[in-house]
Structure formats: C-alpha cells, structure tokens
Image: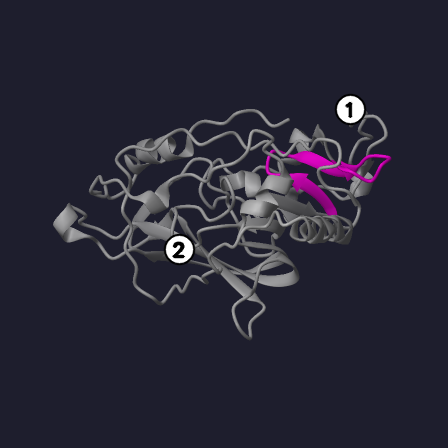
Amino acid sequence: MLSRKQNPFALIVACLLTLLPTLSLASSTHSETQPLSTSSAGDYQTALIESELVFHGRVIKREFGGSTPLTKEGQTRPIPHTFVTYEVIELIKGHLPAGSRRVTLRLVGGDFAGSRLRVAQMPKIVEGDEDILFIRGNTQIPCPIYHWSEGRIRIVHSMAFTEDSQQLGFNSKGQLRIGASRPSLDISTTDGVYTRMSSRDFIPAPAAIPPETRHPQGMRVITQPTELVHALKAAVRDLRAAGKLPTLPPFINADPQQSFTFRFPRQVPTPPLFSPTLTDGAIAK
C-alpha cells in the first residue's frame, strides 16, 4: 500500500513563494479545483469508474505556457503551466478527440516568461516517457491525472510501476497486485522540476536488477504492458455490463495556443488517499 502523501494543494501554496520573479495570485474558491472523490477502497477499479479517459501512450512533446493574468483579481504575471502531448498506443476507456490519436494535458507548474513554478507531488513528465494514465478534468483542474501522481502507471523496460516505484504484477488467480518498491530504480519523478532525464536513461535493464524477494507470494511481475492494458479493458467491459460506469463529461484536449485563466482556491480540503492496492476480484486479467 502506498504511503500517505502531503496535501498537494497546500504544497502548491508554499511552492508559489518560490517563484522567480514572484507571482501575485488572487485567492478565490473555485469548484473546478477541488480534488476528486474516491471510495474507501481506493483502487484502480475506482479510478476506472471516475476517469473520463484511460489510455496507454508515449510522450512525444512537452512545452510550456502561461495563463492570462486576472488583473482585476490581483494577478500581475502569467502562471506557468506545462502542456504534455501523448501519442496514444491503446485506448482503454473513453473517447479520443475526433480524428486524432494524440492527447494533450495541461498541468500547473513549469517554466514560462522567466518564472518557474514548482508544484510538489505534480508528476514530472518528459518526452519519451511511456505511461498508462487515468485522466479527469483536463483544462479544469490543476492536475488532470487522477489523484495527481497516483493515476499514473509508469512503463519502464516493458514492466509496470506505480509513481512510487512499486512494481505491478498478477497473482496466481490473475488478479492485479501491487508488489515491492524498487527505490533504487528512482522511478518517482515528483521531486524537482524538469531537471531529470527520461526514466529510460537511468533505470537499468531487467538483467541488471537484483532479484526481488519482497513481492507478495505468488505474484508474477508484468513483463509486457499489453498484459495490464488487457486487464484494464476487461475490467471496463465488466463495469459497463454491470451498469457501474456513470456518464461523465467528454474529454477535452488542451491547446497550448489557446488563452486560458487560472484561479487558485482559497480553501481546499485534504484530498482522500488513493492507494491502488486491489482487493480480491477488483481487476482480473
């Protein structure tokens, strides 16, 4: 089970003080910036239900932009944002933009117009990264990745990891399981802003990884991303057949060339813990 992290929204407040030059933000409540709800189970099945779009993709472009300052609310400079474009390898849930296999996400933070905004717990995504992503609220909330870094599954050397370096696999019944952490692989990329190279450059090939003895008994690690994709797609089919998939707003692609504004909330609750530790029968291969 993943450890509880600090409130990302509260951390943003602190991080805003590190902007150079300093940004002036108007404080206001805004419902679109509230964290997503989740059930007490907090597993990937819940993420499938609540996400508008789920896909396996590879990053082909990353660029920076800034919001249009809300001068009447005290903003004096653009707020840096990062735009990340994925080439979709396999669609798991939802609908892609018409006639396109590309998805562009907008995340608060980055470098723009001489300012740098560091946002703790915001996933750092670079060109070449391969992920399975759970997306909701793109262009509407600070981070469209479900529960920040928790809605990102890293694919490294064809193996699957959580953002906290925990390896994914299947048990003897074909059920998805969270395995041991491999902190030496340095999978996590949420500390620091765009200073690291792609994970493919510093994570060793499977042959160089020491034997892991702390995985749950009987767990077989995922060695091809298609194994996980097929399991998630099967779960979506089962949820749809059971009538458990609600009607959600359509996914909206971000456009780096389109102007936008950003309001920071005055008060936000601590987001619920999203721990993708699955119970029996949650997702079966």
User: Disc 1 or disc 2, which is closer to the eye?
Assistant: 2
Q: Would residue 217 appear left or right of 277 to someone viewing this image?
A: right
Q: Residue furthest left?
A: 72
Residue 116, percent from left and from top:
34, 45
Judging depth in this view, the residue of 92 and 109 nearest the camera is: 92
Residue 37, percent from left and from top:
47, 37
Q: Would residue 185 appear left or right of 13 to someone viewing this image?
A: right
Q: Would you name the residue on which mark 1 appears?
A: 214
Mark 1 burial class by Cα count in 10 Å: few <14, some 14-19, many 20+: few
Q: What residue is at 71 percent from the left and 49 percent from the top? A: 238
Residue 285 lies in what quarter of the image? top right
Q: Would you name the residue on which mark 2 appears?
A: 139
Residue 236, percent from left and from top:
67, 51
Q: What residue is at 44 percent from the left and 46 percent from the top? A: 143
Q: Secondary structure at mark 2?
A: loop
Q: Secondary structure at mark 1?
A: loop
Query: Is residue 254 depicted above or below 263 in this figure?
Result: below
Inter-mark Cα distance, 1 to 2: 40 Å
Q: Which mark sits nearer the N-terminus, 1 or 2?
A: 2
CB under 8 Å between callouts 1 and 2? no
**Residue type of the residue flagged with mark 2:** Thr
Task: Tell me, yes or no, whether the highlighted magenta stretch contains residue 163.
Answer: yes
Q: Quadrant of the N terminus?
A: top right
**Residue type of the residue flagged with mark 1:** Arg
Residue 180 lies in what quarter of the image? top right
Residue 197, percent from left and from top:
56, 47
Looking at the rendering, the stretch of residues picked out in magenta corresponds to: 159-176
Query: Is residue 255 depicted above or below 265 in this figure?
Result: below
Judging depth in this view, the residue of 190 and 31 nearest the camera is: 31
Query: Is residue 59 depicted above or below 33 in this figure?
Result: below
